[in-house]
Image (tube, helix red, strand yellow):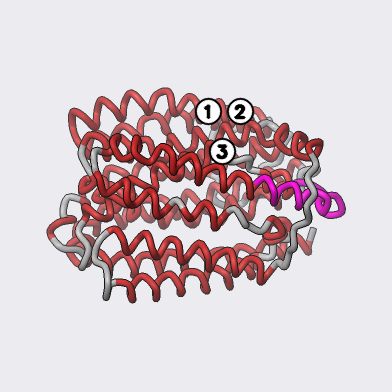
Amino acid sequence: MQEIKKKIYFGFSYLILTRLLGYGFSTIKFLILARYIDPYHFGLIGSVWLFFTVTDIVISPSLNFYLVQKNDNEIDDYFDTVFWVGFFRGFFLFLIIRFFSGHISSFFNDKNVFYAINYLNFIFLINSFSNPHAVYMTKELEFEKKLYSSFIISLADFIFSVYMLKFFKDFKLFIYSSLFTSFIGNFVWYYYYPYLPKFKFSFEKFKEMISFTKWLNISNILGYLLQNFDDWMVAKFLGPEKLAIYQLAYRVSNQPVYNIAGIINEISFPVYSKIKEDKNEVYNLYLKIITLSGCFGFFWVLILFSYSNYIIDLFFNNNWKETSLIIKFLSFYIIFKIYAWANGIIFIFQGKPSINTALMFIETVFMIPFVIYLTKEFGLYGTSIAVTFPIILVSLIGYFKIKNFFQIKEDKIFMRISVLDKYVVN
């Protein structure tokens, strides 16, 4: 147990540095590019990524989750099957998108979308060679390698993107930088985890993995809808420029907290798996996770309400001025979202991903009509309100589910900030 705690400490530190590096590079890059490139081009490439992401998630088997929870001596026989699934999936996605690119561009009513889709589509070919051995990074808590790889990839992307400003000041810059970054990313992971695939495929193992991850796949699809349906409706009803403003507001209000919560969730799943026999340890770790995430979330909301106007005026021109008020609306959303994420990890770890999927389905059912109606009627302000109400409802339902799992009699999980060992599971 002491060794696990040591790995948790160092893993958390490495992941914080990883997120800070990635967020720092991407933020500085964004600030530089935003001074030369209009919001329209940001929104246009954002529209294309919306479709790419949903296509990627819908046809994603999520096999790495299965490998993480398997014993170390059992996973070697699965790697070749995982590689070839990813390989054929990448080529399949490339062909599907190539075929439907015209229909996609007509949905967004923009001829430039057609150009962007057909060039960005090559990312799927590059990523079809993804390295399944990289799962050891999560499984063995080797997050220092993630830090090193993130630094290399982020630095390369930053240098390349800024250099490309000499030649492009429109959406084409994002296309070429994305292709370049995908190639560098694959190269780096093969460097850290050397792997040469064999021409071997096991349908039995594939069926076994799919059986485990089916609820995760459904959750991923619902998660995409929850994360991006609002972007789709903004792009459809309000256009690329408003989409760019909305995505910037979301980035500023949610991304810092999302990064911290992402770090915690990324390290908590393999740790939960290692201590799953001790329910008290799981409960205490869960309390620490929601306390840490919640405190950071509330602190960030206070900063946004106090300084969002100043932040936008300082770093952006008048084209982005509307962003500051949208930031304040969206800041409430992230408080409840990080709590829902923490609960979702518990449901998945205890072998009940269907609970997490059901909660996400409830949130989706409420969110979709709200977003459509309020976006059309009230623009970006309506969209911000529409995504917040459903997550509040789901957080309350998740709270009672967690109480039932841990057999908690007290009603103050949210207030557990200190003296956590005093609360013992019955």
Residue closest to the eye, 21 or 391: 21
User: In the image, residue 199 lies at what x, y percent?
Assistant: 78, 52
Give amino acid for label 3.
Ile
Question: In this figure, which residue is indicated by the disc labeled 2?
Answer: 355
Question: In this figure, which residue is indicated by the disc labeled 3?
Answer: 59
Q: Is residue 199 magenta?
A: no
The span from disc 2 to disc 1 (Cα, nearest Å) is 6 Å
Give amino acid for label 1.
Leu
Q: Is residue 414 visible?
A: no
The span from disc 1 to disc 3 (Cα, nearest Å) is 22 Å
Of discs 2 and 3, which sits in the foreground?
3
Q: Is residue 77 magenta?
A: yes
Q: Which residues are magenta?
A: 69-85
Q: Which residue, as the protein is rendered here, is positioned at the far right?
A: 73
The answer to which of marks 2 and 3 sits earlier in the sequence is 3
User: In the image, residue 383 lies at what x, y percent?
Assistant: 27, 35
Residue closest to the eye, 134 or 257: 134
Quadrant of the image occupied by residue 321: bottom left
Q: Residue at x 24, y 32 (%)?
A: 375
Question: In this figure, which residue is indicated by the disc labeled 1?
Answer: 359
